[in-house]
Amino acid sequence: MSNQSTHQAAGGGKPSHVLVTGGARSGKSRFAEALVAGAGLKKVYVATGQAFDAEMRSRIEQHKQDRGSGWTTVEEPLALAEVLQRESRPDRAVLVDCLTLWLSNLMLEDRNIAEEVAKLGASLSFLHGPVVFVTNEVGQGIVPENALARRFRDEAGRLNQHIASLCERVVLVAAGQPVQIKPSLHPAIKL
């Protein structure tokens, strides 16, 4: 986040929201953490992952170690709009890691995905501080072989499009390198 985003978050206008996307192990979480840390605000980490097995517990623990101290961690697998409304303040930058795990949790709980995504999107305009969302690009590979995996891929694509449309900035991270998608660095493409 730029100094302008920090100023906006401190009361100088609408706070800036950023979507950071990429593939697995692309460096997107590290980039998002650096973005939040560079804002000069208190750092809040909203973790959506749940430790259902030893491998996931290990991943969560590694993320905590990688972040280091100075972060307030809030674990919330489902009520993301509500936790953002509670935690968002002008003196805080909030990192949500990640939207795709949140989507998985919603699907496991058989929640109404469209309703939950709409609620999250609607909450963004009422937040008082900047939010950085991390998500995964899951639709760039082969077509999944089963209906549940295809549904997840499709829901993730719709979720990412919706949140990207509401964020001021969208960044794709590939091989640890950030590429700004929104706002575009190029003039509008015309035929």
Image (cartoon, rainbow, N blue to C red):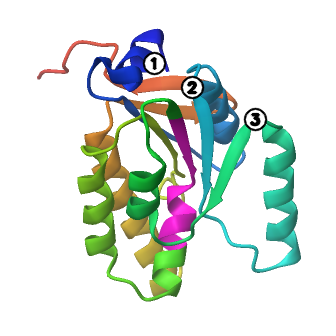
Dot 1 falls on a residue whose secondary structure is: helix
Q: Which residue is mark 2?
A: 41
Q: Is residue 189 shown above or below 148?
A: above
Which residue is the site of mark 1? 6
Q: Is residue 147 magenta?
A: no
Tag 2 secondary structure = loop
Amino acid type of the residue that numbered disc 3 sits on in the rendered structure? Gly
Give x and y (percent) for residue 162: 28, 52
Whether 57 is drawn above or below 171: the answer is below
Say which quarter of the image contains residue 187. Answer: top left
Q: Amino acid at mark 2?
A: Leu
Badge 2 or badge 1: first in the primary sequence? 1
Q: Which residue is mark 3?
A: 70
Q: Taking the image as drawn, is residue 17 in sight?
A: yes
Inspect the image, locate mark 1, and give the three-letter code of the amino acid beneath it. Thr
Q: Are marks 2 and 1 in contact (CB under 8 Å)?
A: yes
Q: Which residues are magenta?
A: 93-104
For label 2, count other residues whose C-alpha is less than 10 Å away and answer few (under 14), some (14-19) or many (20+).
some
Query: Can you say whether 178 is above or below 79 in the image?
Result: above
Q: Gap in Å between the C-alphas at discs 3 and 2?
A: 11 Å
Could you tell me which residue is drawn at 54 percent across and 76 percent down?
105
Q: Position of residue 19 (x, y in %)?
A: 44, 39
